[in-house]
Image: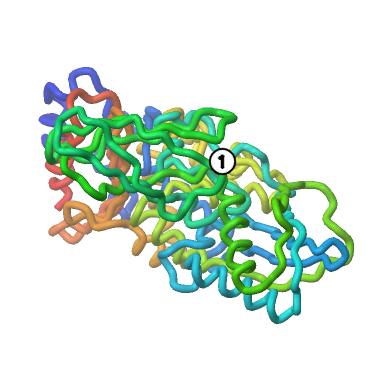
């Protein structure tokens, strides 16, 4: 009855919605409405990537980044492994300050006094950072940061903006945190009404060293923060490191090249340090709790790297193949990325519930379950894109039954803010 009322709502008159619910213990289907129709899942797709990574990489998997030195050429060599946590503030051991300190200590211990070049070795990784279908409006902003073999500070930075007291007056750029090397941002924003919120977007034109910030922020803001995606995290990491080493007395060649290559490395290099990420269990916690798209893309592509492909498309195909072996038709998992940010993704609620059911039977389930946020007193992952909203997860009802569910809505009218309470009312029937 709750779903029938929802489906008849005027906000849904041009939409397609799907709800699939099973009894977790028996597998009995409680409700199936369009359960095998592919819809845009948005970030609920992260439950598929999370479960795939647990199953194929293992909960103790760690990303590795090697730092080496070739004495003959005075070359500092970075051999990255796609670690999305390098320089992240979410763990003390991965913070920018801690990573730079560890590398500096290794260089000082090795007695290195001169660096003439930095080589970043990205063999095994495809060049493109952005998966199919990501929007230009997204990729310049923090949640649309593309994946690099070498990621730094979750590939994001903050922009501090200042607005005046008059509506439509120009907004000025105060600074970026950290300083972004070799890139310029041009503000083309205006001041909007008080409490109008963050309506600012960063755009990165192709093949230029300048970006543009467009949109609005509220009036009377002396220090309004938005977050952007780093244009080149590899360069940002290298320049940050070199600046620190120079202050510590290491001789740095002026106008030093930072070279990214898949070619053969200098002979006779010595590994100075191996940096490890937190274990997968901890990464997936933040992936789902904060819906970090970069983490989802890192896991998807890492599946491919382990099979000598290094591409998002191959990583996604490996996930589809794995779930097909476990009874989910690949036609129900038409995915193009690991995070759900692409509007090209299409998955079914039936497939998502099957993934969630599979997870319940695995030894790694406690970590997976803990990663899901508590929303509306339900343990579930949410997802939002323009015109798409979804929830999927678990709940124990007052009747003692455990339920597994997926609820997706595409092409609704009006705002997500008015739709979500209506979706909650449907899911409240599980309580």
| Residue 135 placement (x, y as % from top left) | 44, 29
**Placement of 361 over or under 407, stated as above or below:** below
Residue sitting nearer the eye, 371 or 21: 371
Q: Which coloring applies here? A: rainbow
Confirm whether residue 324 shows in the render.
no
For residue 160, say whether it is visible: yes
Does residue 28 lie above or below 68 as drawn? above
Q: Position of residue 238 (x, y in %)?
A: 62, 57
Of all residues shown, which one is farthest toward the bottom?
A: 109
**Place of residue 322 in the rendered image (x, y in percent of width and height, measured from the top left):** 57, 46
Name which residue lies at 43% across and 61% down. 361
Q: Nearer the viewer, residue 129 or 313?
A: 129
Label 1: which secondary element:
helix
Is 95 situated left or right of 222 in this image?
right
User: Residue 121, position in %: x, y?
Assistant: 73, 53
Q: Residue at x 26, y 31 (%)?
A: 170
Would you name the residue on which mark 1 appears?
A: 316
**Label 1 crowd (10 A; few <14 / some 14-19 / many >=20):** many
Place residue 1 in its image quadrant.
top left
| Left or right: 64, with 430 as reference point | right
Question: Image check: 310 left or right of 425?
Answer: right
**Number of residue marks:** 1
Q: Determine the residue located farthest toward the top in the rendered image.
A: 14
Judging depth in this view, the residue of 62 and 380 nearest the camera is: 62
- Asked if residue 305 is positioned above or below residue 99 in the image, the reply reads above
The residue lying toward the viewer, choosing from 255 and 119, is 255
Which quadrant of the figure has residue 83? bottom right
């Amino acid at each position: 009855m709750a779903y029938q009322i929802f489906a008849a709502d005027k906000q849904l008159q041009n939409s397609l919605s799907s709800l699939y619910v099973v009894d977790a213990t028996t597998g009995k289907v409680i409700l199936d409405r369009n359960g095998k129709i592919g819809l845009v899942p948005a970030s609920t797709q992260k439950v598929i990537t999370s479960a795939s990574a647990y199953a194929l990489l293992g909960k103790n998997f760690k990303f590795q980044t090697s730092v080496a030195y070739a004495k003959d050429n005075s070359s500092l060599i970075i051999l990255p492994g796609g670690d999305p946590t390098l320089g992240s503030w979410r763990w003390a051991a991965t913070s920018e300050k801690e990573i730079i300190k560890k590398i500096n200590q290794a260089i000082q211990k090795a007695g290195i006094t001169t660096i003439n070049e930095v080589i970043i070795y990205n063999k095994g990784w495809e060049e493109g950072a952005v998966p199919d279908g990501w929007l230009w409006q997204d990729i310049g902003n923090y949640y649309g940061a593309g994946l690099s073999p070498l990621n730094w500070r979750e590939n994001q930075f903050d922009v501090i903006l200042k607005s005046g007291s008059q509506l439509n007056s120009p907004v000025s750029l105060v600074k970026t945190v950290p300083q972004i090397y070799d890139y310029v941002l041009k503000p083309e924003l205006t001041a909007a009404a008080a409490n109008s919120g963050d309506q600012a977007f960063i755009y990165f034109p192709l093949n230029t060293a300048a970006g543009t910030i467009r949109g609005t922020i509220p009036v009377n803001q002396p220090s309004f923060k938005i977050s952007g995606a780093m244009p080149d995290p590899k360069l940002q990491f290298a320049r940050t490191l070199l600046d620190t080493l120079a202050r510590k007395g290491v001789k740095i060649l002026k106008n030093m090249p930072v070279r990214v290559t898949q070619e053969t490395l200098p002979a006779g290099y010595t590994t100075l340090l191996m940096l490890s990420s937190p274990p997968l269990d901890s990464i997936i916690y933040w992936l789902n709790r904060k819906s970090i798209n970069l983490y989802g893309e890192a896991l998807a592509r890492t599946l491919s790297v382990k099979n000598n492909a290094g591409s998002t498309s191959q990583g996604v195909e490996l996930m589809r193949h794995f779930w097909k072996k476990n009874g989910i038709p690949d036609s129900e998992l038409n995915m193009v990325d690991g995070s759900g940010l692409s509007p090209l993704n299409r998955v079914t609620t039936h497939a998502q519930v099957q993934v969630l059911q599979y997870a319940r039977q695995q030894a790694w389930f406690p970590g997976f379950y803990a990663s899901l946020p508590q929303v509306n007193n339900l343990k579930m992952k949410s997802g939002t894109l323009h015109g798409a909203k979804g929830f999927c997860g678990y709940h124990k009802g007052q009747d003692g039954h455990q339920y597994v569910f997926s609820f997706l809505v595409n092409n609704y009218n009006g705002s997500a803010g008015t739709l979500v309470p209506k979706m909650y009312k449907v899911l409240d029937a599980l309580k």
